[in-house]
Image (cartoon, rainbow, N blue to C red):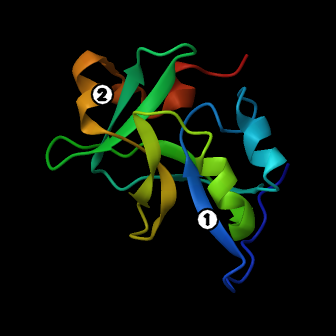
Amino acid sequence: MDALSPLVFNGETLLVAVCGLHMRGYPLEKQLLAHDARFIREDETAPVYRLYLLPTTPAKPGLIRTSQNGSSISLEVWEMPVKNFGSFTALIPAPLGIGKVLLKSGEEICGFICEGYASESAEDITSFGGWKGRFPLR
């Protein structure tokens, strides 16, 4: 699927940043598609994040904003109808959630974030630059 230009925001859609199993080709992409989302582009966070491999089944990434030693993390930006956003976010298990993600451009959009306590029992995978760097598609 080619990247598309985002629709003009008119209160009917919003942008959502995903950085793991919801990306194209990964197992949870189907949840985005089931909520009528469409891929817009690949992007990166501002260099203020750490990425953790959460000890879940299946393994999931946890994106945590930090005040020091942050890096840019690769992600995807999707567009979703606002009317589907609530039912989509209801599928997200703790310690993950939706919050504001700061992109390298300075834009803040909705996206997957992780509660800080989860990093205590997780492997720091920030050096891979993103989920695809640690778990490339085969």
Q: Earlier in the sequence, mark 2 or mark 1?
A: 1
Q: Which residue type does callout 1 highlight?
A: Leu
Please tell me whether mark 2 sits on a helix, a strand or a loop.
helix
Q: Nearer the viewer, residue 59 or 74?
A: 59
Q: Position of residue 99 (x, y in %)?
A: 42, 56
Q: Is residue 101 above or below residue 22?
A: below
Q: Which residue in the protein does label 1 denote?
A: 15
Q: Secondary structure at mark 1?
A: strand
Q: Is residue 136 visible?
A: yes
Q: Nearer the viewer, residue 61 or 137?
A: 61
Asked whether 35 or 127 is in front, the reply is 35
Q: Residue at x 42, y 57 (%)?
A: 101
Query: x, y percentage for residue 79?
Result: 70, 62
The reply, left or right, for residue 127 in relation to residue 90 is left
How far apart are the two marked residues, 2 and 1, measured between alpha carbons?
A: 25 Å
Tell me the residue at 41%/14% (across/down): 55
Quadrant into which the C terminus falls: top right
Asked whether, in this view, residue 58 is left or right of residue 120, the answer is right
Q: Which of the 4 image quarters holds residue 24?
A: top right
Q: Amino acid at mark 2?
A: Ala
Q: Is disc 2 in contact with disc 1, using a CB cutoff of under 8 Å?
A: no
The vertical placement of 1 against 78, above or below, is above
Q: Position of residue 56 (x, y in %)?
A: 48, 16
Residue denoted by label 2: 118
